[in-house]
Image: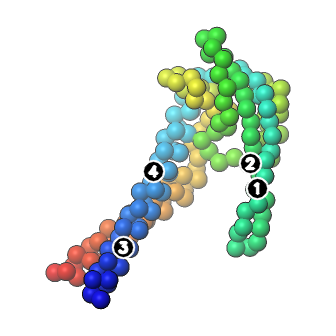
Amino acid sequence: MAKKKKENKTAGFFIFLTLAAILLFFGFSKYINGKKTESWPSVEGTIISSKLNHRFVETKRGAKIEFIPEIKYVFYVDNIRYESTRISYKSTNGIIIIERYPEGRKANIYYNPKNHEISVLETGMDYYSIYLLLPFGFISLVIAILSLIVNLKRKI
């Protein structure tokens, strides 16, 4: 029985440590990738497909419809054709994005100068990662460390 209690005490540490790692990884990667796009060169490209997909999502308040933009564009760098579907590294409103990038429209395409296959329609970082993912990641890390300290003090 004492063994089960010990496992439960360390389980909290590992749960919060795992949660912290996931939140911090995604938060930092979204932030860094978004920030990098701000200095990428751009070329004119063409939207070749623009659709608005939807899915039903269950929430505590009931079902809701989530709109997901699906935009495909083509652009040329050094006379080489590239196609992509990445809109941005930040969160987007599907309906507004579809209105902004209808099929056939010319648009600035921002591409990674080191790997032209990586591109976006909109540059910038996602404040969602700064104000949500990163703080909760750090909070989870602090809880994990405090949990470990409490468990170590109990052993002494």
Q: How crowded is mark 3: few (under 14 residues within 10 Å), some or many (20 or more)?
A: some
Q: Distance between the residues labelled 2 and 1?
A: 8 Å
Instruction: Compute the Cα span from label 1 to label 3.
Output: 35 Å
Q: Mark 3 points at which residue?
A: 11
Question: Which quadrant of the view contains residue 124?
Answer: top right
Q: Is residue 92 something one can see in this rendering?
A: yes
Report the residue marked by disc 4.
25
Tag of residue 68: 2
* Quadrant of the rendered image containing residue 151: bottom left
2 and 1 marks in contact (CB < 8 Å): yes
As rendered, which of 95 and 3 lies closer to the eye?
3
Q: Which amino acid does label 1 sit on?
A: Arg
Residue beneath the point at 38% across and 70% down: 143
Which of the two labelled residues, at mark 4 and mark 2, occupies the earlier sequence position? 4
Neighbourhood count class around disc 1 (C-alpha, 10 Å): few under 14, some 14–19, many 20 upward: few
| Rendering coords of residue 95 (x, y %) | 80, 47
Foreground mark, 1 or 4?
A: 1
Residue at the image position 74 percent from the left and 36 percent from the top: 71
Alpha carbons under labels 3 and 2: distance apart: 37 Å
Residue situated furthest left in the rendering: 156
Dot 2, how many residues are within 10 Å of its Cα: few (below 14), some (14-19), or many (20+)?
A: some
Label 3 or label 2, whichever comes before in sequence order: 3
Q: Is residue 138 or residue 12 the one in the foreground?
A: 12
Q: Which amino acid does label 2 sit on?
A: Ile
Q: How far is mark 1 from mark 4, CA to CA?
A: 27 Å
Looking at the image, is mark 3 or mark 2 nearer the viewer? 3
Task: Give the quarter of the figure containing the N terminus.
Answer: bottom left
Name the side, left or right, on which 11 lies relative to 133: left
How far apart marks 4 and 2 lie (CA) works out to 24 Å
Q: Among all residues in the image, which is located at the extreme bottom? A: 1
User: Which amino acid, by three-letter code, is at mark 4?
Assistant: Phe
The residue under label 1 is 55
